[in-house]
Image (cartoon, coloured by chain):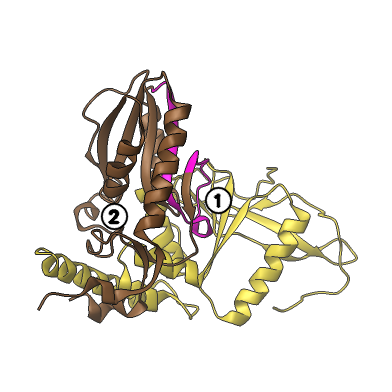
Amino acid sequence: MTPAFAHASEAEMSRILDFYAVRWEYEPDTFPILWNTDGDVVESFSPDFYLPDLDLYLEMTTLRQKLVRKKNRKLRRLRELYPNVEIKLFYARDFRALMLKYGRLALIDGLSGTSGQVAAPYQAAAAADEAIAAGLASARSGPGSEPGTGLGLAPAAAPRRRRTGATTASTEGTAIHR
Amino acid sequence: MSRDLHADIGEILLTEEAIRAKVIELGARIAADYAGRNLTLVSVLKGSLPFMADLMRAIDIPVRIDLMEVSSYGGASTESSGLVRILKDLSASIADEDVLIVEDIIDTGLTLNYLIRYLRGKNPASLRICTLLDKPARRLVEIPVDYTGFVIPDSFVVGYGLDFGELYRNLRYVGVLKPEAYAPDATG
């Protein structure tokens, strides 16, 4: 079953990964990154994708600059606390380049610079891409906020499996260790 | 009036001379490394065609060649299945052969990752990778590359086999495409 993606760029990335037969899970793990003095988790980070064959997490950021800064901070924190976790951040410019490479021209404008949801705009952009692709084929046939107070510096818990995507069975609520 | 492809290039990244010199250098290294072995070069169409043609002539040892083509994401021929397809398979067995994949460019590594898995299933004696261009900023799948011509910046490049919308492959150099050349209204 296809998960409910939070952003159209995530849905597109899932299709790209599927196309190249790269197994993925959608937001399977949640990493606590900030604790209060009582040891309660006050901030966590759930990377968008986990690619089990590559043991790699992938985070998509096609959001506004303020939110990107917040995400960068969370990512730095995650890397400090979980140095063995491999994670790659895909910025808006990375996604634009990917869409350009694959000829998904309309999606370049449709997916970046907003907190866009998977809804009509995406479908319209996808339809526009198909139209552009058809035109091409025809034309070319000739030629952040800081919640809580008091920082805990060491991980109090292992990352927690939250939700699993289309390709692997779910183990919801089970603590995992990578 | 025919379109001036050169006018769409914002910057020449690699001149014809620089490419030629690098290909000769790579060919000499490969010839030395594979001396006395059964080398098969496997080129991935269409982008690596010019590189393959030049590289094979720069390798001064006996060498076999073969060609493959795989569908690319977003391509019209692949939309129906949603899965990468082998559009042209190898024409001969590579079992027990030393295989060198010849690529024009490695960016995300997704296509190459797929190819490596596919070719490993054909039981070559060894499987290594040669690429003219490496764009590590775009890497999604980390793949060890044995022979690299040039590490290039994160720009959209065309020429010497690399295309945009099937054009620019015949440029003798590698250049950065002007953004206006890939604006939607520039494709018609």
Circle 1 residue:
A50
Rendered position, B2 above or below A3 = below
Circle 2 residue:
B161
Q: State the quadrant of the N terminus of chain B.
A: bottom left
Chain A: what color?
Answer: yellow
Q: Which residues are magenta?
A: B124-147
Q: Amino acid at mark 1?
A: Tyr
User: Toward which corner of the image does residue B57 lie, by quadrant?
Assistant: top left
**Residue B29 shown left or right of residue B176 in the figure:** right
Q: Provide residue B135's location: percent of width, then percent of height.
A: 48, 56
**Residue B82 shown left or right of residue A6 in the figure:** left
Q: Is residue B142 magenta?
A: yes
Disc 1 is placed on an element classified as: strand
Chain B: what color?
Answer: brown
Report whether residue B66 is seen: yes
Disc 2 packing (10 Å; few <14; some 14–19; many ≥20): many
Q: Residue at x 16, y 71 (%)?
A: A135
Q: Residue at x 41, y 18 (%)?
A: B36
Q: Amino acid at mark 2?
A: Gly
User: Toward which corner of the image does residue A156 lie, by quadrant?
Assistant: bottom right
**Residue A29 shown left or right of residue B30 in the figure:** right
Q: Provide residue A120's location: percent of width, then percent of height.
A: 33, 77
Q: Is residue B8 magenta?
A: no
Rendered position, B70 above or below B163 = above
